[in-house]
Image (tube, rainbow, N blue to C red):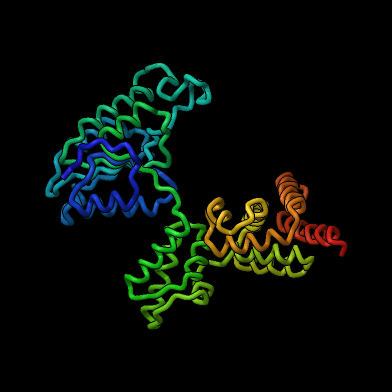
Amino acid sequence: MANRQTRRASPGYNELKAELRAGNWQRLYVLSGEENFLIERLLEALTESLVSEGSRMLDRVLLDGNNRRLSPAQVEAEVMTPPFLSRCKLVIVRQSGWFAAPARGRSADDDDSSPDDAEPAASNGPRDRQAALAALFAKVPDSACLVFVEQKVDRRLRSLVQAIEQNGVLAEFTREQPRTLARWIEGECKRRGLAVEPLAAESLIDRCEGSMQLIWQELTKFFLYCDNTGQRQIDRQLVDDLSLPDLHGSIFDMTDAISDGRTGRALELLDVLVSQKQPVQLIQFMLTRHLRQLICAAELGRPDAIQSALKVPPFVANRLSQQSRRLPPRLLEQLYAACFETDIRIKSGQIGDRLGLETLLAESARAIGDARGH
């Protein structure tokens, strides 16, 4: 049944799924965040719980926020139309942009300014739309479930946020912690009668940058492979053979080569990455980010502190800790600055991106060798 209680704290995915399994749902959901995988899973769960399979064409309505003609009045018309055969009508509005601050108005940094007061009331202006939305949220019937899927919700829109929280759910789905992702991977594998090595799970998380959508795509490949071959364990070798290239691991190896003064090995690793169709700009970005992580690791010291602060898997934290001890912090900062100087030269047309990165690697290895008196 529809739940009309006020929920102040932002609920998580598991809490919302448990509520649906118990037969309860909210009349209003406003979902945002970068972890689209969880948002789509929740939409699937809402569809299965509320909409009869034979009437999804009628009782599950999708509205595109990119349509400039879309208005709160149109959404209200859909919400107020009773369901055909389902227990509830599901209305999903994607990327309306109605929960972002107006572009005009005073700076949000001013003490008394807020998007609620950013511009005077005008016909069909942002303030009028916010008022219309707040009024709509308060009268969504129990026979409907209204879901907004947004890139971001500006919490400075205080009256609108308050209206959401008083009448439904405001939830943001951010990237999960590596430990949570590892448990999720293990659970999905166990559900299919498969075992997964912890190191394989950590490598997969690292290769996919913690994105559940990418991890799921890779897991699907493993499941198909295991079904066809009869293999019952996903190990590191299988991840190396079937999954995305280990770009982060290659950057680690490249940094090791630089720190040892082995320019040839660093350039060889670059050739391998380019042959794997990795963009040179991405490789340089990853190298720059890696050096920034090493600077942080040098300051943090312990792997557990590195894991917590940088939100990386345990094996990555251990390797960052070990590698950061090989180079003095002052030298790491010089290499980090050199990355930015190279980026400026490339973007200003002084040098090509491939040659710029090769020069950066060679000069970095030489600088480390000179610092060590080689």
Number of marks in the rendered image: 0
Question: Is 136 on the left or on the right of 235, as rendered?
Answer: left
Question: Is 287 on the left or on the right of 99, as rendered?
Answer: right
Q: Which residue lies at the image location 20% right of the left edge and 35% below the top edge?
A: 140
In the rendered image, which quarter contains the N terminus? Answer: top left
Name the image quarter holding residue 67. Answer: top left
Question: Is 373 on the left or on the right of 138, as rendered?
Answer: right
Q: Which residue lies at the image location 42% right of the left edge and 42% below the top edge?
A: 151
Question: Is 287 on the left or on the right of 209, as rendered?
Answer: right
The percent position of residue 11, horizontal first and vertical second, equals 33, 45
Q: Which residue lies at the image location 32% right of the left edge and 36% below the top edge?
A: 8
Name the image quarter holding residue 120. Answer: top left
Classify 74 as above or below 145: above
Asked whether residue 255 appears in the rendered view, the answer is yes
Viewer-proximal residue among 109 and 240: 109
Classify 249 as above or below 70: below
The percent position of residue 158, horizontal first and vertical second, equals 38, 27
Asked whether residue 346 appears in the rendered view, the answer is no
In the rendered image, which quarter contains the C terminus? Answer: bottom right
The percent position of residue 144, horizontal first and vertical second, equals 19, 41
Q: Residue furthest left?
A: 85
The percent position of residue 251, horizontal first and vertical second, equals 65, 62
Classify 258 as above or below 23: below
Q: Residue furthest bottom?
A: 230
